[in-house]
Amino acid sequence: MNKSSALRDILKRIDHRGYPAYKDTAGQYDFGGYTLSIDHVQGDPFAAPSKVSVHMSGRQAGFPPALYDKPCKKTALEDYLIRRFERAAAQYSFKAKGSGKSGLIAASRCGQEVLCRSACQIEPGNGSLIFRMEIGFPANGRSINASELEKILFDFLPECVGGNLAYASLDARQLEKNAFLAEDQQYIRSQLEPMGLVAFVANGAVLPRESGVSSRPMKNAVLFTSPKELEVTMQLPHRGAIQGMGIPKGVTLIVGGGYHGKSTLLEALQLGVYNHIAGDGREYVITDDTAMKIRAEDGRSVQRVNISMFINGLPNGRDTSAFCTENASGSTSQAANVCEAVEAGCKTLLIDEDTSATNFMIRDELMQSVVSKDAEPITPFIDRVLQLYEQFGVSTVLVAGSSGSYFYKAAHIIQMKQYVPADITSFAKEKAAAFRRPEPEAGELEPAEMQCRRRICANSRMQKNDRIKIKVSGKDTILIDKEPIDVRYVEQLADQEQLAALGYMMRYAHRYLINGKSELHSVAEALSRLAQKEDFMELGRGSYVPVNMAMPRKQEIFACLNRYRSLRLEG
Ligand code: ADP
Ligand code: MG
């Protein structure tokens, strides 16, 4: 391998030359404590920054296997290192000057969730480490400013790497705490199923966030306390006993006056499919990791989804067992979201009345007597919620502040009162019994009603296109060759980097998975396996490994495919 001095020589030679001469720097260089790899050099100072990675052998990184010998600990360690590095790099970023993106140093901007990211990957077999980042190679106008890059690669980067990525320079106690938290979180997750729960919310948790634009914990929030009736204790391997609210499987209703913290609780459950960092307040809010937020999503496209359990006999005579539309209504979009969630393996539906279509959720008695059943294509969710659980094992946690109809269906009713939950099940049931008898549920559900064959037709234009461009805008849109996939209402996409990975996944699907007519289901499963294996290298096949990516869940992979309009689906 080249010595680092070879890189210095190249930099001297190309200084002041035209920007493309920077391409000569690509390659690997031994920096003593690590290998620096220049993987991809940007074409000009205004293009996306260059991709650079740092490689350390197990011996160079020096982490004891106890810090990464389980997937949850490995991800937590990687996350810890990324945050350390990023904090250090922020001090040096743009300290080297020049035009365009000159001087940028960035690996990943992590939020509150602990996700598997391409920025840092530890090899579980031998403890070796790869750290990937972007660096803006400095220029004056369009000519190379090599002495500024020399500063970055020979002064700044060794500081960031040496002080933050090697075990010897880190606080061993902190690292251990970080690993212990991950193991405790994983333990709670593993206990949900045997304890018959869909979620656990620890006493003392801080659920509300600082503001609508900040996901840090609210200061001086009312701490969560479980109602006694729902309180469960878990013996965590490190922290010891912990108490909190266990939300049982089945149908659970969250009620309460406006502004009493209902949606805040549901939002915490939504993100409880991920682990959170120490200090977040939701460290011990853990939800069944197949759970999906279900909401109305007017305008989305729906392709060949069997929504007949909810919608039948539309006035235009359209077939709802393979329903298609380019522009779904509130109710049809929410129906499709439920059916697709079940297809994606979701076992817990999370629904907030605030973001639901009323006519999808309920039909009150008066309306039933005025508009007869045969003039109404919608079988509301309330008539299916118990069947979904009893026949398919799909639980529902539902926030409803304005309609009492679900009192009849819920096994547990929680009232939020000034941010404190109370179990009001028996009181509410008593009231409900005195009110009226519940309507019988709609007819039995056939298992066949859940599925509908969906095959993706190969798109030769995309398959031949070896320069499919991927762009991401915030947490809203993924652009695949300029075609937008609107994911703004896929609320459990927690991080822009997950959108970037989804973009690469769509491209990967075009190139390697979709041939002839491939089942949508198997394409989604194949992509999920890549995510499970954390195989960023395969995602970037044929090119450098992408940076700034975080793996999404299987459920969001399905959600993305389902919203990708130009994927043509057939039976
Ligand atoms: P609801 O859905 O019942 O109308 P929200 O969950 O939207 O109520 O909460 C209303 C407001 O109260 C929000 O601004 C939220 O940040 C705040 N809030 C929620 N939970 C707490 C809490 N535990 N302590 C302090 N403020 C809270
Ligand atoms: Mg609300």
Image: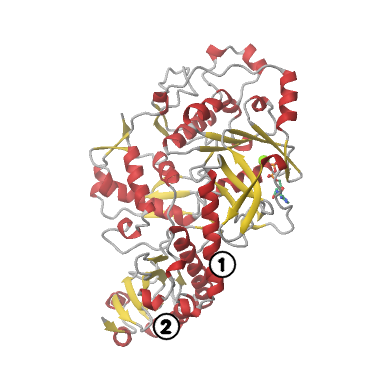
Residue at the image point whose x is 56% and y is 24% from the top? 380
Q: Position of residue 496 (x, y in %)?
A: 48, 55
Please name which of the two marks, 1 or 2, marks the residue nearer to the observer.
1
Report the amino acid beneath label 1. Answer: Lys
Q: Which residue is identified by label 1?
A: 177
Nearer to me, 62 or 473: 62
Residue labelled 1 has its Cβ within 8 Å of some atom of ligand 1 = no
Tell me which numbered mark, 1 or 2, is placed earlier along the sequence. 2
On the question of residue 327 being in view, the answer is yes
Q: Is residue 492 above or below residue 26?
A: above
On the question of residue 140 being in view, the answer is no
Report the amino acid beneath label 2. Answer: Glu
Q: Is residue 505 left or right of residue 390?
A: left
Residue labelled 2 has its Cβ within 8 Å of some atom of ligand 1 = no
Q: Is residue 86 left or right of residue 202?
A: left
**Label 2 Cα crowd, 10 Å radius (few <14 / some 14-19 / many 20+):** many
Local SS, label 1? helix
Q: Position of residue 400 (x, y in %)?
A: 66, 33
Nearer to me, 248 or 415: 248
The number of discs equals: 2
Quarter that holds the N terminus: bottom left
Residue at the image point whose x is 36% and y is 43% from the top? 524
Nearer to me, 362 or 142: 362
Quarter that holds the C terminus: top left
Q: CA distance from mark 1 to mark 2?
A: 39 Å
Local SS, label 2? helix
Q: Which residue is identified by label 2?
A: 148
Q: Position of residue 485 (x, y in %)?
A: 42, 45
